[in-house]
Each structure stands twice: as C-alpha cells, then as structure tokens.
Image: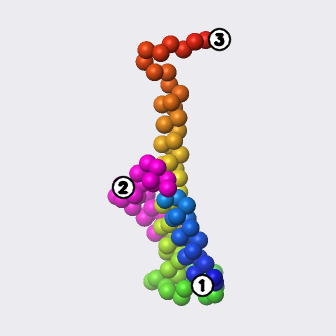
Amino acid sequence: MGRVEYLLVLGACVVVTLPLELAGARVYRRPGRLVRAVLPVALVFLLWDAVAIAAGVWDFDPAFVTGVRAPFGIPLEEVLFFVVVPVCGVLTYEAVGRTGQFLRRLARPRAGRRRVRS
C-alpha cells in the first residue's frame, strides 16, 4: 500500500460518511456554508504545516505519500486531509443534529392524543 495509504484512508473517510449526506445531513447541498466552515480552519493549519516544514520541524515520509507537493512543500495528502476530515466532521455533526430533531418529534405527543399517566 505504502504511497497511497494516506489517500486510501481519506477515501475511506469519505465513503463511510457519505451515507450521512444521503440520509439527510444536507451538507454537500449547501456548498457555500461548507466552504465557510472548512476553509478558514484549513488555511490556518496549512500555514502551520508550511512553517513547520520550512523550519525543519517535521516532514512526511516519502514512503507514505505520493510525492505530489502543493506550494510550500506540503504533500497533496496533507492538503486533502485538512479538507476531507473537517467535511466528514460537519457531516457527522449535521446528521446527529437531524437525528436528534427527528427523535424529539417522535417523542412529542400528537395533537388530539391524550397522555395517560400511570
């Protein structure tokens, strides 16, 4: 696996959370909101990575990345990480919120129905 392992893990994250969108999370259907949620954080961490790489604080093992580098020497996989993982997080957050709303609606007594106390 080696050089594509990082990409495979990111792909698995997308595949595992995709059903949440199909179940009603509605994250991909609102791209503007998604970009506003993910982009600022991704830029901060990409800048952090760029500074750390330039300072020699860390780098990425060539055996586990494809070798494609974005500006400032950041591996493609790392750029994708800062997009994919937050998107998966937003999907999960929205799905949990919608599930909670659905369960609260189920628990509410319907109009015309009396609750019987025991």
- Image quadrant holding the C terminus, namely top right
Residue 61 location, quadrant: bottom right
Q: Which mark is residue 86?
A: none
User: The disc labelled 2 sits on which kind of residue?
Assistant: Arg
- Image quadrant holding the N terminus, namely bottom right
User: The disc labelled 3 sits on which kind of residue?
Assistant: Ser
Asked if one can make out residue 9 in the rendered structure from this viewpoint, the answer is yes
Number of residues whose C-alpha sits closer than 10 Å to that of mark 3, classed few (under 14), some (14–19) or many (20 or more): few
Q: Secondary structure at mark 3?
A: loop
Q: Residue at 57% x, 12% y: name it.
A: 116
Eyeballing the image, is 1 above or below 100?
below
Q: CA distance from mark 1 to mark 2?
A: 32 Å
User: Label 1, on which residue?
Assistant: 3
Which mark sits nearer the N-terminus, 2 or 3?
A: 2
Q: Observer-nearest residue: 82 or 65?
A: 65
| Range of residues picked out in magenta | 19-47
Q: Is residue 107 magenta?
A: no
Which mark sits nearer the N-terminus, 1 or 2?
A: 1
Q: Observer-nearest residue: 72 or 75?
A: 75
Q: Secondary structure at mark 1?
A: helix
User: Label 2, on which residue?
Assistant: 29
Q: Secondary structure at mark 2?
A: loop
Q: Residue at 51% x, 41% y: name it.
A: 99
Q: How many marks?
A: 3
Which mark sits nearer the N-terminus, 3 or 1?
A: 1
State left or right for residue 74 relative to residue 39: right
- Residue 62: x and y, percent? 61, 88
Residue 36 location, quadrant: bottom left
Eyeballing the image, is 11 above or below 95?
below
Q: CA distance from mark 3 to mark 1?
A: 64 Å
User: Label 3, on which residue?
Assistant: 118
